[in-house]
Amino acid sequence: MPATYQTMHEIIIEARRRCDQHTWNYIAGAAETETTLHRNRHCLDRLALRPRVLRDVRSIDTSTTFLGHKLRIPCLLAPIGSLETLTPAGGVAVAEAAAEFGTMNLVSTVTQPTLEEIAAAVDHPKIFQIYIRGDEAWTDELIDRARNAGYAALALTVDSAYYGRRERQLITGWLPPSIRRYGTDLRIHQAGLTWESMDRMRERGGLPFILKGIQTAEDAELALERGVDVIYVSNHGGRQLDHGDGAMETLKEVAGTVGGRAPVVVDGGIMRGTDVLKALALGADVVALGRFQAWALAAGGREMLVRALEIIEGEIRNAMGLIGVSSLGELDGSFVKEATAATQAHELSAFPFLPDHVRRSG
Ligand SMILES: Cc1cc2nc3c(=O)[nH]c(=O)nc-3n(C[C@H](O)[C@H](O)[C@H](O)COP(=O)(O)O)c2cc1C
């Protein structure tokens, strides 16, 4: 029963028990040497919190708003392809968990069931994440379908001109269903994207438009000049370009440039309530959860994802109280400082009490 799980450790152990090696690698793995993945955690580990005291923290509000919608915690559910490999209900399980808990999810172009079925499953604001696997007519139709299905916003992923070299997959010869379904030839359409094609999609959609995968101040500036509504800092959990910087370092650079002109989302290695507070202190408005979400789904579908969100909510509340803030708006750069990392970073290093067979299962 999900309610008996007290920490993410137990959930991850259960996910490992239920996943075959291919599915486990699909969730945990990243590109080539997995250096970007490790840096995501390392950058978080290198930040220390600076708590303030004697500030009456009896009442704590973990909620925020994103694009005008209330979120119970500042954590979106990042888009994940091939969700049907993690839980039979696929994207419906995530949408239902988001609605039940009180947050928003991003629905990947390359997950099952269809975007319409996911939209119809539960009536709460969801975001559609776009990958391009066809020409302009194909793209127009996809955007029209998302708008007609009632999505609240669109997110174009821009860090995926080519598919990252995921060596765990290359070694075993396994590919996720999304790749098997679309093949690799159609990705050429994603590689051909330009700022002009982004403008066209934004206008066609007529919905709040998010660019997911911004990794430099220069591109954040270009996006803002062109009217993008939300800057989403992400290196795709290290699954695309290897040897990029950790997401928290990128966030500092990008949030400084954005300077409050648009909301900033960040993902990459966020596993803990303290991670969430660090990201917000560095200028993010909300974070998104990738592998955290995937492990919970693999461990027990919708119910386990709700439980995992309750656990991170508890961590956020606890950490807010201990650093002396009652609301998220009080967080700023004064609550973090550079420190030395205390652990060797890897995809599971936020969970030091996992048994060896789970930690070394790559
Ligand atoms: C199994 C898996 C599948 C993913 N599929 C997509 C996808 O279809 N579209 C997308 O934009 N990002 C995708 N991502 C990237 C996530 O949206 C997110 O950027 C990343 O997982 C954040 O890092 P984290 O896993 O360390 O939290 C995927 C990530 C994982 C782990």
Image (cartoon, rainbow, N blue to C red):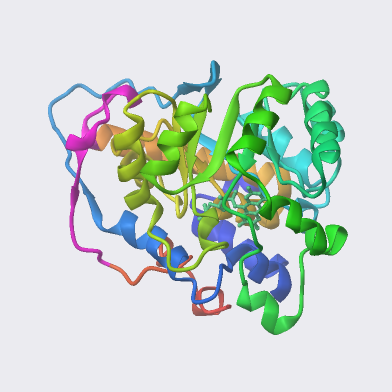
Rendered location of residue 125, percent (x, y): 67, 23
Which region is colored magenta?
Answer: 323-342
Point 69% across, 42% down: residue: 303
- Is 310 displayed left or right of 62 in the figure? right
Where residue 316 sits, quadrant-wise, is: top left
Q: Is residue 30 above or below residue 212?
A: below
Q: What is the x, y in percent for residue 10? A: 54, 59
Which quadrant is the C terminus positioned in?
A: bottom right
Note whether residue 314 is visible.
yes
Please indicate, yes or no, whether residue 327 appears anywhere in the rendered image: no
The front one of 309 and 334 is 334
Residue drawn where x is 49% and y is 76% of the image = 33
351 on left or right of 323: right
Left or right: 208, with 226 as reference point: right
Which residue corresponds to the image point at 40% horizontal and 47% vertical from the top-left?
Answer: 216
The quadrant in which residue 30 appears is bottom right
Q: Is residue 224 left or right of residue 320?
A: right
Residue 345: where, in percent of width, then height?
Answer: 37, 68
Q: Residue furthest bottom?
A: 171
Of residue 30 and residue 331, the one placed in the foreground of this image is 30
